[in-house]
Image (tube, coloured by chain):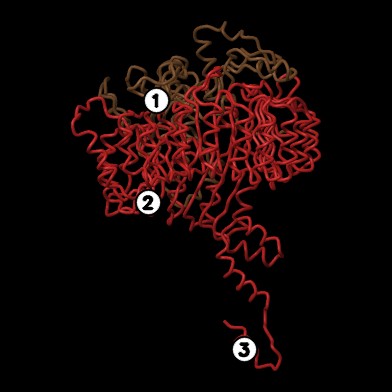
C-alpha cells in the first residue's frame, strides 16, 4: 500500500548503498574488503549504529541440516546485533582505565556504533549542530540531505520556525499548525534580511555561509549558527581563533 | 447524598423511589474505582457494560501504551480524560541491537502535541524506546504546569539543550531519570539550569548514560539544596574524588550511581584515600542500591563494604573486575536481590555470589567480550552454582560461550520460581559442549518445570524439538526471543499453536517461513507484536497475513533501508502489530506497509 509519504529529503543516506548490488542473494561474499580509502570509511559509516559489516552468509548457514551445523565453527565473521548486547556495553574492556583488562581482546571500536556515530558527526559533518541566537535548544542537520545552499536554508528555516514559535507561545498549540505555515514563508536565510547563516569550519574560523562552492562547504563545515544580520560585523571583527567556546 | 435522602427529595412518595439510579451507581463506582490501580483489572472493569466503561475511563489516571502505533493519541485522550501519568513504548526491542534502521519511527511528537492540550494536569511521562526531540521536551516543559516526573529509557533524538529546558521550567520536577538513552552533547550546561532559588523538590536524578561532562560545582550545589534527594546516579565524568564530595552532602541517599569510580589522574592523596571513602559510605545508612562503577579502579571497591549489608541491588555490569576483587565485597551482601555483573568475575565469582546471596531474585551476567570464542570466563559451572545457592531466583540473563543441558535442567529444578529465563550462548549453533547434543532438553526442562515462566530467550543449537517443548509446556509464556535456532517451519508452528498467552515474539536468523507464519493467523491479533528478521518468509506470505487480518499492520523493511524490504527471495525484516487506527502515516520510505 502506498502511504502518503511526502517527505522530499528521504534519501538522507548517500548513494553509496549502490555499492551493494540490489540483486545480490544471501551469499554475500567478502568482497567488501576490496573497498578502499574513503569508500571504505563511508561504507562502515552507513551501517546503523553498532553494526559491523553485515554478512548474511552466516545467516544462511542455519538452513543447512542440524548435523552439519553441529560442527564447531571457527571464528565466524561478526554478525550484526550479535550477541544481543547494547552498544553502551560494548567497549568496556577498552574503556576500563588503569588496571589491565581481564580479556586481552578488547572489543574493537567499530563495534561501538555509538562512539562511531559521534566521531563521524564531528569529522565529516553529515550531521552538523546548528544553533540559533536566542534559542537555547540546538538542533542537528544532515547536510547530505541537501545539495544546495537554498535547500539548506529552507530546511534551517523549517527547523527554527517551530522553535521560535514554541518559545513565544507557551500553550504549545503551535505544533499542529506549523506545517502549513512553513511552506508559505520564504527561507530564513535566503531572501531574508533579518537573519544570516554562518558556520564554523574545521579550522575554527567563522565564515558566512554561501561564499564557497557547496561541496567545499560540506567538507569543511563543523557547525552552523543562525545569527541576526546586525551581529555579522561583530563576529567578523572578533577575528579568527576564538578559544574553543561554545556558541553562547 | 444517601439513598434515603434521595427518596425524600422525590416528594415523599410512599414507594422507595430513586431518580437516576444509573447515575448513583456510577458515582459509587467511580469512588470505588479510584482505588483500582492495576491496568489489567481496569481493562476487565471496562468490559462489564457501558456504564462501567465510562466510570472506568473517567477514573483512570495512569495510561500505559505498550506500542505507540497500536492506537492514535487522540483516541487515548478522548477515552481517558483525567490522566496524570502516561507510559508509552515505541520501538521493538531488537532496535537496541542495530536491527532497526535509524529513522524507523516511534516519534513522541504526535503524542506530546495531543497531550499538551488534553492533559494539562499531567504529572508523569515514562517513555521507552521512543524518539524524543528537544522540541518535544520543550513542549513538555511549557504545557504541564504540574509536571513532576520524566523517565526516559532507551530513547534518543534529544540533547542536553532539551534537558536544560525541562529542568529550568518544570518547577515541580521531582524525578528526572535518563536510563540508557543516547543524549546529544549540545554543550549546554543543563545542570546549572535547575532553579537555584530555595530548596528543590528533587527526589531522583539519574544521568549515568549522558556522555557529556557536567558542571560539578552546580551539581554539588543542587545536591546541597535537595533535602529530599534519594536517588542520584552520576555519569562517568564524575571521578571518585568528586563522588566523595557529593556523598558527604547527601547521606540520606537510598540509591547511588557512583560515576566512574576511579580517580582523576592528578590524584596523589595516597594516605587518607581509603579511610575517607569508607567513612563517607559508612555515613550513608540508607543506601540500598548501588550502580555506576563505569571506569572502576578496583582498589576502590572495598570502600562500599560499609553499605553492603543493606544492599538489595548492586549493578557492577560496567566494572571490569575479577573474582578476587569481587569476593571481599560480595560476601557482605546477604540481602542482595538484584545483581548485575560482568563475566570477568568468572565462574569462581558466581560461586561466591551463590554462597552469600541467598535472597537473590534477579541475576544478569553480561559479556565483557562479545566475540564468538571457544573459551569464555563463565560457563555451566557458574550457572549450576547459582542454581544451587540462589533458590529464590526469579529472573536470569546469562551470557556465556558454552553450556550444558545438565546445568540448565538443574536450574529448572532448583529454581522453580523462575519467571524470566534468558540464556544467551554467544557461540551460535553451539551444542551441549559435553554431550554434543542440541540444547533442546535444557530449555525443555525450563518450560516444563518452571511453572511461572512468562519470558524466555533461547540460544545454542536447537532443533524443532525445543520448540515443541515450548509450545507444549510454555502456556504462560508471553515473551519469546529466538535467534539462530530451529530446523523448519514446524518449530514456529509448535510455538504459535501452543503458546496461548504469547504476546511478543522476536525471531532472527531462523528457518521459519510462510507456512509457519500462516499457522499463527488465529493468534496474531492477540499479540503486541511479531518480529521476524532474516528468516524465510516471503513478500507473498506477509501479504497473505495482511489480507486476512486487516487490523494488523504488517511492516516489511530492510535493515539497510533499501526500499522494498526484500533480500533475494525473502523478506529482510517483518514487523507486525495490531492497531486500532490503521497503518501509521509517519512510516519512512523504506518501510513498506502491506
Among the two numbered marks 2 and 3 on one chain, the one whose residue lies closer to the N terminus? 3
Spot occupied by residue B510 in the image (x, y as percentages of width and height): 70, 26
> Which residue matches tag 1?
A223
**Which chain is mark 1 on?**
A
Relative height, residue B33 to residue A53 (above, below): below
Classed neighbour count for the residue bearing mark 1: other residues with Cα under 10 Å, few (<14), some (14–19), many (≥20): many
Whether marks 2 and 1 lie on the same chain: no
Spot occupied by residue B256 in the image (x, y as percentages of width and height): 36, 43
Observer-nearest residue: B445 or A30? B445
Classed neighbour count for the residue bearing mark 3: other residues with Cα under 10 Å, few (<14), some (14–19), many (≥20): few
Rendered image: mark on residue B203:
2
What chain is colored brown?
A
Q: Colour of chain B?
A: red
Q: Is residue A237 visible?
A: no
Picture quadrant where residue B433 is located: top right
Task: Check if mark 3's residue and mark 1's residue have beta carbons within 8 Å.
Answer: no
Label 2, secondary structure: give it: loop
Rendered image: mark on residue B9:
3
Picture quadrant where residue B110 is located: top right
Rounded to the nearest angstrom, the CA distance separating label 2 from label 1 is 37 Å
**Which chain is mark 2 on?**
B
Amino acid at each position: 500500500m502506498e502511504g502518503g509519504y511526502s517527505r522530499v529529503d528521504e534519501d538522507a543516506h548517500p548513494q553509496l548503498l549502490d555499492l551493494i548490488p540490489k540483486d545480490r542473494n544471501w551469499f554475500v561474499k567478502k568482497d567488501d574488503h576490496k573497498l578502499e580509502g574513503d569508500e571504505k570509511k563511508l561504507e562502515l559509516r552507513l551501517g546503523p549504529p553498532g553494526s559491523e559489516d553485515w554478512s548474511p552468509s552466516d545467516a544462511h548457514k542455519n538452513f543447512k541440516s542440524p548435523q552439519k551445523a553441529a560442527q564447531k565453527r571457527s571464528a565466524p565473521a561478526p554478525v550484526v546485533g550479535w550477541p544481543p548486547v547494547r552498544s553502551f556495553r560494548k567497549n568496556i574492556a577498552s574503556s576500563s582505565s588503569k588496571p589491565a583488562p581481564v580479556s586481552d581482546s578488547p572489543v574493537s571500536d567499530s563495534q561501538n556504533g555509538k562512539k562511531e556515530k559521534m566521531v563521524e558527526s564531528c569529522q565529516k559533518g553529515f550531521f552538523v549542530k546548528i544553533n540559533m541566537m536566542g534559542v537555547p535548544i540546538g538542533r542537528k542537520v544532515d547536510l547530505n540531505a541537501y545539495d544546495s545552499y537554498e535547500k539548506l536554508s529552507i530546511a534551517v528555516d523549517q527547523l527554527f520556525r517551530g522553535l521560535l514559535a514554541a518559545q513565544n507561545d507557551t500553550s504549545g498549540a503551535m505544533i499542529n499548525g506549523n506545517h502549513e505555515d512553513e511552506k508559505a514563508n520564504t527561507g530564513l536565510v535566503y531572501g531574508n534580511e533579518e537573519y544570516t547563516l554562518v558556520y564554523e569550519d574545521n579550522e575554527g574560523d567563522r565564515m558566512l555561509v554561501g561564499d564557497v562552492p557547496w561541496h567545499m562547504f560540506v567538507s569543511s563545515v563543523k557547525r552552523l549558527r543562525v545569527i541576526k544580520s546586525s551581529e555579522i560585523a561583530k563576529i567578523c571583527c572578533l577575528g579568527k581563533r576564538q578559544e574553543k567556546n561554545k556558541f553562547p | 447524598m444517601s439513598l434515603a435522602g434521595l427518596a425524600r427529595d422525590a416528594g415523599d412518595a410512599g414507594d422507595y423511589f430513586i431518580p437516576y439510579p444509573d447515575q448513583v451507581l456510577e458515582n459509587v463506582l467511580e469512588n470505588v474505582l479510584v482505588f483500582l490501580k492495576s491496568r489489567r483489572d481496569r481493562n476487565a472493569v471496562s468490559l462489564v457494560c457501558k456504564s462501567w466503561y465510562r466510570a472506568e475511563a473517567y477514573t483512570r489516571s495512569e495510561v500505559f501504551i505498550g506500542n505507540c502505533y497500536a492506537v492514535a493519541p487522540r483516541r487515548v485522550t478522548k477515552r481517558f480524560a483525567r490522566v496524570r501519568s502516561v507510559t508509552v513504548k515505541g520501538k521493538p526491542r531488537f532496535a537496541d541491537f542495530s536491527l532497526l534502521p535509524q529513522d524507523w519511527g516511534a516519534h513522541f511528537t504526535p503524542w506530546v502535541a495531543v497531550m499538551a492540550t488534553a492533559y494539562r494536569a499531567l504529572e508523569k511521562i515514562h517513555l521507552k524506546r521512543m524518539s524524543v526531540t528537544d522540541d518535544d521536551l520543550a513542549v513538555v516543559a511549557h504545557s504541564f504546569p504540574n509536571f513532576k516526573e520524566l523517565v526516559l529509557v532507551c530513547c534518543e533524538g534529544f540533547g542536553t539543550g532539551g534537558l536544560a529546558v525541562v529542568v529550568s521550567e518544570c518547577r515541580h520536577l521531582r524525578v528526572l531519570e535518563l536510563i540508557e538513552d543516547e543524549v546529544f552533547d549540545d554543550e549546554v550546561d543543563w545542570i546549572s539550569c535547575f532553579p537555584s532559588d530555595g530548596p528543590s523538590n528533587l527526589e531522583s536524578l539519574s544521568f549515568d548514560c549522558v556522555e557529556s561532562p557536567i558542571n560539578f560545582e552546580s551539581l554539588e550545589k543542587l545536591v546541597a539544596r535537595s533535602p529530599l534527594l534519594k536517588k542520584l546516579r552520576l555519569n562517568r565524568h564524575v571521578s571518585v574524588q568528586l563522588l566523595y564530595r557529593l556523598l558527604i552532602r547527601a547521606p540520606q541517599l537510598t540509591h547511588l550511581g557512583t560515576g566512574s569510580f576511579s580517580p582523576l589522574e592528578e590524584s596523589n592523596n595516597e594516605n587518607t584515600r581509603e579511610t575517607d571513602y569508607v567513612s563517607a559510605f559508612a555515613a550513608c545508612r540508607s543506601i540500598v542500591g548501588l550502580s555506576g562503577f563505569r571506569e572502576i579502579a578496583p582498589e576502590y571497591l572495598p570502600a562500599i563494604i560499609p553499605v553492603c549489608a543493606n544492599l538489595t541491588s548492586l549493578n557492577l555490569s560496567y566494572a571490569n573486575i575479577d573474582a578476587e576483587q569481587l569476593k571481599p565485597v560480595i560476601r557482605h551482601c546477604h540481602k542482595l536481590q538484584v545483581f548485575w555483573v560482568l563475566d570477568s568475575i568468572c565462574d569462581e565469582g558466581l560461586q561466591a555470589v551463590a554462597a552469600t546471596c541467598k535472597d537473590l531474585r534477579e541475576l544478569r551476567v553480561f559479556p565483557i567480550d562479545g566475540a564468538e570464542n571457544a573459551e569464555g570466563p563463565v560457563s555451566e559451572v557458574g550457572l549450576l552454582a547459582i542454581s544451587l545457592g540462589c533458590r529464590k531466583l526469579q529472573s536470569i540473563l546469562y551470557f556465556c560461550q558454552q553450556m550444558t543441558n545438565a546445568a540448565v535442567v538443574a536450574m529448572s529444578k532448583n529454581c522453580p520460581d523462575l519467571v524470566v529465563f534468558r540464556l544467551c550462548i554467544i557461540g551460535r549453533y553451539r551444542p551441549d559442549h559435553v554431550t554434543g547434543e542440541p540444547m533442546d532438553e535444557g530449555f525443555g526442562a525450563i518450560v516444563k518445570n518452571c511453572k511461572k515462566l512468562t519470558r524466555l530467550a533461547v540460544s545454542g543449537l536447537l532443533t524443532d524439538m525445543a520448540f515443541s517443548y515450548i509450545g507444549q509446556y510454555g502456556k504462560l509464556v508471553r515473551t519469546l526471543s529466538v535467534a539462530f535456532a530451529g530446523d523448519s517451519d514446524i518449530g514456529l508452528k509448535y510455538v504459535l499453536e501452543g503458546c496461548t498467552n504469547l504476546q511478543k515474539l522476536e525471531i532472527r536468523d531462523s528457518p521459519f517461513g510462510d507456512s509457519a507464519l500462516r499457522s499463527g493467523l488465529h493468534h496474531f491479533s492477540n499479540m503486541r507484536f511479531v518480529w521476524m528478521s532474516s528468516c524465510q518468509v516471503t513478500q507473498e506470505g506477509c501479504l497473505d497475513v495482511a489480507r486476512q487480518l486487516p487490523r494488523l499492520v504488517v511492516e516489511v523493511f530492510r535493515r539497510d533501508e533499501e526500499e522494498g524490504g526484500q533480500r533475494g527471495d525473502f523478506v529482510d525484516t517483518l514487523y507486525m502489530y495490531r492497531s486500532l487506527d490503521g497503518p501509521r502515516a509517519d512510516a519512512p520510505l523504506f518501510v513498506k506497509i502491506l
